[in-house]
Structure formats: structure tokens, C-alpha cells
């Protein structure tokens, strides 16, 4: 079976990033740059015919407009951005940041974020390995002593960070084809990645687990 890992992608899910910058200097979002990045995201999304949030979430753009990353490596330390997503979408955003900082005399204040090896990080590696082996999600959740929904949230976070996971085997077991299409199309049409809103909109027809599962497939296929 073909591995779900892309080149150089696996090491970036080993650890959880925590902010290591001095909040006295780095906690202010540059609203002008943020607007530029959001417009750029909209343009790229239009070109690729995908929702803007699939490229980078708002939280990721806000952090970019706070720390001014200047390299692909810097981008991988941004919340919700792994090496896969950084390589796929990062170049025009880095160019926009460099142009803005040069024109406004701003020096990059992006610093290497501290990595902490915690149990949750180990869980991510284990989860990815099990999904690669196509182990049923409920068995993975049971082995980690977490609920099915909690496992979906873990996998969702992994995919948002830029790791491509093939979850089609689980989707085929848990969601019928018509429901899958309906939920998938919903995420294609909305402009904001708001799971609470998705559950509110779709919850009468589908369970939260079904919605999250298709959301994971959607993010993994289009964002990574």
C-alpha cells in the first residue's frame, strides 16, 4: 500500500509547537498586512477553485501578520501549517510578507518556536501509523482510551497542519455515498472553516462524527 506521508512531512507532526516569542513585542497583529494576506488567500483560492480557509486558516494568517515569517521553515512553525502546506501554498505569502516588511522598514521578528515532546505528540505519530495501516478508527480510539469524536479532532488537527491522510477506508464504512457527497459539497461552498456552524447546519441530517469525518477527508484532499 502506498504510504500517506509526503516527502519530508512525517517529522513535522512529531511535536506540538508552542509559542516562544516575547509577547511584549510580538502580540500585535499588523492589520494592514493581515488584509493583504487575506486578499492574497482569496485570489489563490479563486485560482484553485477551493474555499479560502483550505489554504490557510484565519489563525495562521494572523500569526503570519504578527511574526513575519521569511522562509518555508519559518512557516512550518506557524499554527496550522506543516511542511506539506507550506511547500504547496507558502511561496506567494512569503513574497507578500517580504515585500510588505521591506516597504515599511519592518524586520522579521519570527523566532524558532520551542518544540515540546509530550504524550499528545506521541499520539499523533501513533495515529498516523495506524491510519496508514487502515486500522478502524474505533480501534485506534479504544487503544488510546479516547472517544471516537476525540480521535476525529486529533486527526483533524493533523490534517490542518499539512499532513495528508487517506481516510477513505473509514468513510466507506461509516458514511453512505449520498451523505458523503452532501457533506463534502457543503464544505466546498462555505467560505469559513467553522465546525460549530457546520454541525448546526447539517446536524439534523447527519451526526457530528459523520460531519467531522468528511471534513477530515475534505481538508486532507484539498489542503494538503
Image (cartoon, rainbow, N blue to C red):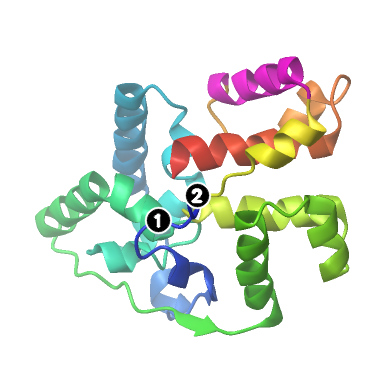
Q: Is residue 106 above or below residue 161?
A: below
Q: For this rendering, which residue is in front, 136 or 164?
A: 136
Residue 13 lies in the magenta stretch:
no
Which image quarter holds the C terminus?
top left
Query: Can residue 134 be seen?
Result: yes
Measured as percent of width and height from the top left, residue 59 is found at 51, 52
Magenta segment main secondary structure = helix
**Left or right of residue 67, residue 173 in this image:** right
Q: CA distance from mark 2 to mark 1?
A: 7 Å
**Left or right of residue 214, residue 86 in this image:** left
Secondary structure of the residue carrying tag 1 is loop
Q: For this rendering, which residue is in front, 40 or 125?
A: 125
Q: Residues within 10 Å of mark 1 (few under 14, many from 20)?
A: some
Q: Are marks 2 and 1 in contact (CB under 8 Å)?
A: yes
Q: Is residue 10 above or below residue 168?
A: below
What residue sits 88% from the left and 63% below the top? 142
The disc at residue 151 is none
What residue sits 29% from the left and 35% below the top? 40
Disc 1 target residue: 6
* Marked residue nearer the N-terminal end (2 or 1): 1
Secondary structure of the residue carrying tag 2 is loop
Q: Which residues are magenta?
A: 176-189
Residue 193 occupies which quadrant of the picture?
top right
Measured as percent of width and height from the top left, residue 11 is found at 45, 72
Q: How many marks?
A: 2
Residue 186 lies in the magenta stretch:
yes
Measured as percent of width and height from the top left, residue 6 is found at 40, 56
Disc 2 target residue: 164
Measured as percent of width and height from the top left, residue 78 is found at 43, 63
What residue sits 66% from the left and 18% below the top? 181
Amino acid at each position: 500500500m502506498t504510504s500517506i506521508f509526503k516527502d519530508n512531512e512525517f517529522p513535522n507532526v512529531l511535536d506540538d509547537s508552542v509559542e516562544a516569542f516575547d509577547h511584549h513585542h510580538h502580540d500585535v497583529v499588523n492589520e494592514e498586512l493581515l488584509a493583504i494576506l487575506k486578499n492574497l488567500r482569496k485570489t489563490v483560492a479563486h485560482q484553485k477553485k477551493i474555499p479560502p480557509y483550505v489554504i490557510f486558516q484565519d489563525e495562521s494568517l494572523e500569526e503570519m501578520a504578527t511574526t513575519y515569517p521569511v522562509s518555508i521553515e519559518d512557516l512550518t512553525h506557524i499554527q496550522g501549517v506543516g511542511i506539506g502546506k507550506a511547500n504547496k501554498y507558502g511561496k506567494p505569502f512569503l513574497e507578500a510578507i517580504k515585500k510588505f516588511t521591506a516597504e515599511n522598514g519592518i524586520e522579521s521578528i519570527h523566532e524558532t518556536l520551542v518544540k515540546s515532546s509530550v504524550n499528545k505528540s506521541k499520539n499523533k505519530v501513533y495515529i498516523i501509523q495506524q491510519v496508514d495501516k487502515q486500522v478502524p478508527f474505533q480501534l485506534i480510539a479504544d487503544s488510546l482510551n479516547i472517544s471516537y469524536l476525540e480521535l476525529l479532532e486529533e486527526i483533524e488537527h493533523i490534517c490542518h497542519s499539512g499532513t495528508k491522510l487517506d481516510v477513505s477506508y473509514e468513510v466507506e464504512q461509516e458514511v453512505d455515498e449520498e451523505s458523503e457527497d452532501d457533506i463534502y459539497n457543503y464544505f466546498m461552498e462555505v467560505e469559513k472553516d467553522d465546525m460549530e456552524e457546520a454541525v448546526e447546519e447539517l446536524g439534523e441530517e447527519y451526526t457530528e462524527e459523520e460531519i467531522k469525518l468528511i471534513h477530515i477527508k475534505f481538508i486532507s484532499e484539498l489542503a494538503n
